[in-house]
Amino acid sequence: MDDFNPFRTPSESEQVLARVIADHSASSIVFERGWCRYQFHKKSRLQLALHAMKYEGLYNLGTMFGRQLGEWILTCKGISDIDCIVPVPLHRLKKIERSYNQSEKIAEGIGKLLQKPVKSDLLQRKRYTVSQTGLSALDRKKNPEGAFQALQGIPPCHVLLVDDIITTGATLVAAALALRQGGVEKISFAAVALAVKD
């Protein structure tokens, strides 16, 4: 899968991710660590694979991508205090339509490598949102705002929040803000791919 245009190092992907979020987010969100395995380009083989994973029922690709991310994360120091892995949730109607959440499959792959539990019940998407695909940068920023809610219970200290693709970071930021409001102290981000300008 090297022809999928991977980042050269975890620190390179973390720096690009921090820049993307700073450039596109009106909300200030500080994340502990961030990992993205691949650079996402339109009309690439990676886009075809992620589309198949997300819309064509090939959810096993999610687990495979998750294992790759897990291997990538394990090369880094300072990850031992991650308490659990939280996938970005789908709205319940969208999950019924697709029958699975691709971010959960990715999180499961990471969890097996990191030996950390996947907690899909810590965060819910309370508002139905349209797909970010095809939206303008401004609409991508507004679309997920206020869409998430942390569920009641004793919050973990450090959560690894997982999504499939990061374009502007708006979805991750909205989900992270909800977790912070729910009492989570530290949040790290992980995604299979990070969109880069062609």
Image: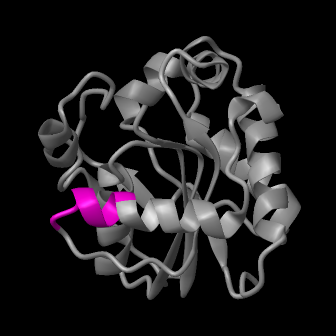
Q: Main secondary structure of the magenta part?
A: helix
Q: Check the image and report above or below for 153 versus 122.
A: below
Q: Is residue 159 left or right of residue 64?
A: left
Foreground residue among 162 and 45: 45
**Location of residue 44 (image quadrant):** top right
Q: Position of residue 81 (x, y in %)?
A: 69, 88
**Location of residue 39 (image quadrant):** top right
Q: Is residue 177 magenta?
A: no
Q: Position of residue 163 (x, y in %)?
A: 52, 48
Q: Check the image and report above or below for 140 versus 34.
A: above
Foreground residue among 147 and 66: 66
**Location of residue 31 (image quadrant):** bottom left
Q: Residue furthest front?
A: 198
Q: Is the N terminus in the top left, top right, bottom left or bottom right quadrant? A: top right
Identify the residue shown where x is 29% and y is 52%: 170
Q: How many marks?
A: 0
| Display coloring | one colour
Q: Is the C terminus in the top left, top right, bottom left or bottom right quadrant? A: top left
Q: Is residue 97 left or right of residue 78?
A: left
Q: Which residues are magenta?
A: 20-26
Q: Is residue 23 magenta?
A: yes
Q: Check the image and report above or below for 197 versus 97.
A: below
Q: Is residue 153 left or right of residue 157?
A: left
Q: Position of residue 49 (x, y in %)?
A: 66, 20
Q: Would residue 130 be visible to someone looking at this image?
A: yes
Q: Check the image and report above or below for 132 versus 121.
A: above
Q: Would residue 149 be visible to someone looking at this image?
A: no
Identify the residue shown where x is 30% and y is 31%: 132
Foreground residue among 173 and 115: 173
Identify the residue shown where x is 81% and y is 35%: 2
